[in-house]
């Protein structure tokens, strides 16, 4: 049996957009949805837990019941279940991730930090999960999947990576094209004389980037012959290139190699920029 899509629900506008996206995604792949509400807000409200627990439980029940009804109204064929967990949202969603095809989250929450570009729960889960996490964000066209294009950011170790496989499966299910893109930078010691491009280090950097993209997608392209693939190399910082290209995509797929160290640095600059600024939903697929 296919693992469900797990959706973090909290009643916020961003959460509802994520829920709608998840319903469509579940229908596309024939997956069930599991709606998860988790919170321990009483810790932060200055109210004794025994006093706030009934109100919190009542609100949780209302949120998940409304979310489940929204799923049914959007697509009655999608199987849906709900779960209310008395735990902090990040811990609960990380615990759910191994039993999900992906965890789907809104880009903002409804708590103290709701005005940030990216909610603290979404960032924490995307940075720490060992399984795919989708942060649903972007403009109307990206959310509506009207571009018919999946964008894959190709990193240094993309060959055979879970992100590449994820991107091809998405493109095949959607019946759309796949853009595999690799950003490259001109070596610092290269001169400003652009006439040397054909033979100099700049040309070599571009050729290496092109070879890396081709190698990254070769096996999956053969396994998914119906998916049109365009391999592209672009000079510039990867985080800026991908954010700019996301304006013409329905989904941006990124691989992530989790780093050890201070919390919040695990995703790297590219992942952080995409999660904060992409014009379409972003899926972070850990490399292991």
Image (spheres, rainbow, N blue to C red):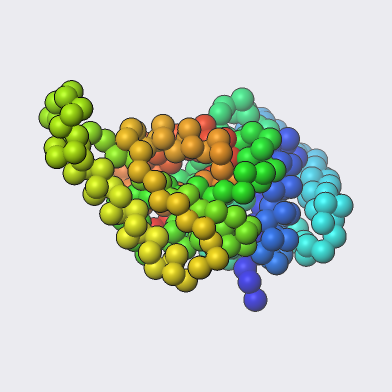
- Where the N terminus falls, by quadrant? bottom right
The C terminus appears in which quarter of the rendering?
A: bottom left
> Can residue 179 be seen in this snapshot?
yes
Q: Within the image, what quadrant is residue 28 found in?
A: bottom right
Q: Position of residue 185 (x, y in %)?
A: 26, 35
Q: Which residue is nearer to you in this view: 10 or 73?
A: 73
Does residue 43 lie above or below 151 as drawn? above
Q: Residue at x 56, y 39 (%)?
A: 248
Left of 98 or right of it: where is 189? left
Residue at the outermost bottom position: 1
Disc tally is: 0
Q: Horizontally, is 133 left or right of 44 in the view? A: left
Question: Residue 279, how many percent across, how many down?
Answer: 57, 35
Closest to the observer, 226 or 70: 226
Q: Is residue 88 visible?
A: no
Q: Quadrant of residue 53?
A: top right
Residue 221: % across, % down: 45, 65
Q: Is residue 283 above or below residue 15?
A: below
Is 269 situated left or right of 100 in this image? left
- From the viewer's perspective, is 211 left or right of 277? left
Residue drawn at (48%, 33%) of the image: 244
- Residue drawn 63% across the image and 71% down it: 2
Residue 111 horizontal/vertical position (percent):
65, 32
């Amino acid at each position: 049996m296919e693992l469900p899509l797990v959706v973090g629900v909290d009643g916020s506008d961003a959460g509802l957009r994520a829920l709608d996206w998840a319903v469509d995604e579940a229908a596309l792949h024939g997956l069930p949805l599991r709606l998860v509400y988790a919170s321990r807000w009483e810790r932060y409200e200055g109210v004794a837990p025994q006093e706030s627990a009934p109100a919190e439980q009542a609100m949780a029940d209302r949120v998940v019941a409304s979310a489940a009804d929204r799923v049914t109204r959007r697509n009655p064929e999608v199987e849906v279940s709900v779960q209310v967990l008395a735990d902090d949202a990040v811990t609960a969603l990380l615990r759910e991730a191994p039993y999900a095809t992906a965890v789907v989250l809104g880009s903002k929450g409804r708590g103290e930090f709701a005005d940030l570009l990216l909610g603290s729960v979404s960032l924490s889960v995307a940075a720490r999960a060992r399984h795919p996490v989708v942060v649903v964000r972007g403009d109307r066209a990206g959310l509506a999947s009207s571009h018919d294009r999946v964008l894959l950011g190709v990193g240094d170790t993309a060959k055979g990576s879970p992100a590449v496989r994820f991107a091809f499966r998405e493109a095949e299910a959607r019946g759309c094209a796949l853009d595999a893109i690799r950003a490259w930078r001109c070596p610092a010691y290269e001169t400003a004389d652009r006439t040397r491009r054909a033979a100099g280090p700049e040309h070599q950097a571009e050729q290496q980037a092109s070879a890396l993209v081709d190698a990254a997608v070769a096996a999956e392209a053969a396994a998914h012959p119906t998916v049109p693939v365009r391999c592209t190399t672009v000079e510039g910082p990867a985080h800026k290139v991908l954010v700019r290209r996301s304006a013409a995509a329905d989904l941006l797929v990124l691989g992530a190699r989790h780093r050890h160290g201070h919390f919040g640095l695990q995703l790297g600059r590219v992942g952080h920029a995409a999660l904060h600024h992409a014009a379409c939903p972003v899926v972070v697929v850990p490399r292991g």
